[in-house]
Image: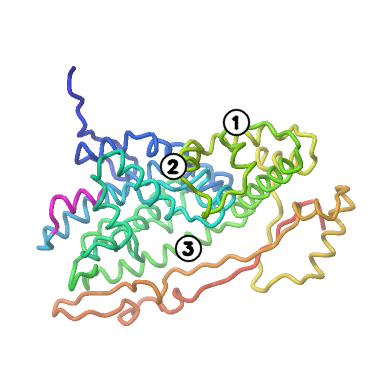
């Protein structure tokens, strides 16, 4: 049999040609666990706001692989000691950093499995893949978990200026058309360095860091926390909750076997095992969309109405406020909604709900971004900022939301 060429080249709309650097990485990409990411949207239901935002976790992971190759080459060029094994393992770690995401990414993170973050699930998937690849992912898992001696390799994967953020800001900016998020990832990567086992940015890259942090703040308010997108994802969460409630009362819901299992069982981190993981690996956006399309005609008024809202983009009104919404305001709206839609006290909670969301571009309490001067001195980025007040970007901005039908006044 002719041996397959595994050193492939992939054409990406952001970076051009992306090379797959090793046969092991090719085999990981070919694995069904990774191929599932083709069917997981990168930005949940943001395409209901920005029609171009149809890209997937698969594309993002490959973009991260590409940028990590650049970052490692930059550091090696500057004399940082990174062995071939460490290089390949770091590439594997960034490639798999999002493999634990479920349908619609962050939107349904706790709706199908309670108490397990996608990062934790990613580790579980890596460990399972490691079994199948006979221990070849041992070092990649250590690097991903931050337990390897070379701390800077983990910082490339997870920090306040990591490869993950460099790709998703640039990629999401491209696909949404929101130009404010278009960071100069090449410049930031070119300014990377390592000192005392810590990842640093050279002095000449300080302004690029400021631009990166500002872009992150703007992308969160304009895209990730856009009120229409936020409202759509909250409806999606309510749909699955209603489906679970109906199934718990022995009502019949049409969905595929795998999704049905997660709707029938209250799965928490304490009961997550290998069998559940195999089922979770079968789930993707398509399962949810197919179920929602089917449930539009379900006799339950709440479920069918919510499903029609998502499918036809007839979404709730979403109000964002600087202060929490007064209980009296909510009670007044509840009465109007109950009367108009003929709902019970329990049912009305599916049509009006509140919560809060926050935006913090820079966190002083988590792996601060450090700037390396030519004389060897190191300073935290906000100490040298003269273009922007980074202390403002580091302050969490909390907004409170209220969602309810648009025809209620």
The image position of residue 325, as x and y in percent, is 72, 70
For label 2, the SS is loop
Camera-side mark, 1 or 2: 1
Can you tell which mark lies on residue 231? none
Residue nearest the viewer, comparing 353 with 149: 149
Residue denoted by label 1: 256
Which residue: 28% across, 63% down?
Answer: 147
Which residue: 66% across, 69% down?
Answer: 321
Give the image quarter of residue 394. bottom left
CB within 8 Å, label 1 to label 2:
no
Instruction: Write the start and end of the magenta stretch as one range.
Output: 82-91
Image position of 81 with respect to 292: above or below: below
Please indicate whether residue 2 sits to the left or right of residue 170 in the image: left
Q: Earlier in the sequence, mark 1 or mark 2?
A: 2
For label 3, the SS is helix
- In whole angstroms, how far apart are the C-alphas of marks 1 and 3? 39 Å
């Amino acid at each position: 049999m002719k041996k397959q060429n595994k050193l492939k080249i992939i054409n990406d709309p952001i970076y051009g040609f992306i090379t797959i650097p090793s046969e092991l990485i090719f085999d990981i990409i070919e694995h069904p666990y990774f191929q599932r990411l083709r069917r997981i949207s990168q930005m949940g239901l943001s395409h209901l706001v920005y029609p171009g935002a149809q890209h997937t976790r698969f594309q993002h992971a490959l973009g991260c692989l590409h940028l990590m190759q650049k970052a490692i080459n930059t550091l090696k060029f500057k004399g940082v000691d990174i062995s071939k094994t460490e290089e390949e393992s770091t590439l594997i770690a960034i490639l798999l950093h999002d493999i634990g995401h479920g349908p619609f990414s962050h939107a349904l993170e706790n709706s199908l499995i309670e108490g397990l973050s996608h990062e934790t699930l990613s580790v579980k998937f890596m460990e399972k893949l490691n079994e199948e690849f006979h221990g070849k992912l041992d070092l990649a898992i250590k690097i991903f978990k931050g337990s390897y001696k070379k701390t800077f390799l983990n910082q490339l994967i997870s920090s306040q200026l990591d490869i993950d953020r460099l790709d998703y800001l640039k990629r999401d900016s491209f696909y949404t058309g929101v130009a404010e998020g278009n960071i100069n990832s090449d410049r930031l990567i070119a300014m990377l360095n390592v000192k005392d086992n810590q990842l640093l940015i050279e002095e000449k890259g300080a302004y690029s860091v400021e631009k990166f942090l500002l872009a992150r703040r703007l992308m969160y308010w304009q895209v990730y926390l856009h009120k229409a997108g936020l409202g759509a994802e909250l409806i999606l969460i309510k749909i699955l909750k209603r489906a679970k409630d109906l199934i718990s009362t022995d009502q019949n819901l049409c969905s595929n076997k795998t999704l049905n299992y997660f709707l029938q069982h209250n799965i928490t981190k304490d009961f997550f095992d290998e069998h559940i993981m195999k089922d979770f690996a079968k789930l993707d956006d398509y399962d949810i969309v197919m179920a929602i399309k089917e449930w539009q005609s379900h006799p339950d008024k709440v479920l069918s109405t919510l499903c029609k809202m998502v499918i036809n983009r007839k979404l709730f009104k979403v109000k964002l406020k600087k202060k929490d919404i007064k209980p009296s305001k909510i009670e007044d709206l509840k009465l109007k909604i109950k009367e108009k839609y003929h709902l019970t006290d329990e049912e009305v909670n599916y049509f009006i709900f509140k919560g809060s969301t926050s935006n913090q571009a820079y966190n002083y309490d988590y792996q601060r971004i450090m700037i390396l001067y030519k004389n060897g001195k190191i300073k935290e980025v906000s100490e040298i900022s003269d273009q922007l007040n980074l202390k403002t970007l580091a302050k969490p901005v909390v907004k409170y939301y209220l969602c309810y039908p648009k025809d209620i006044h």
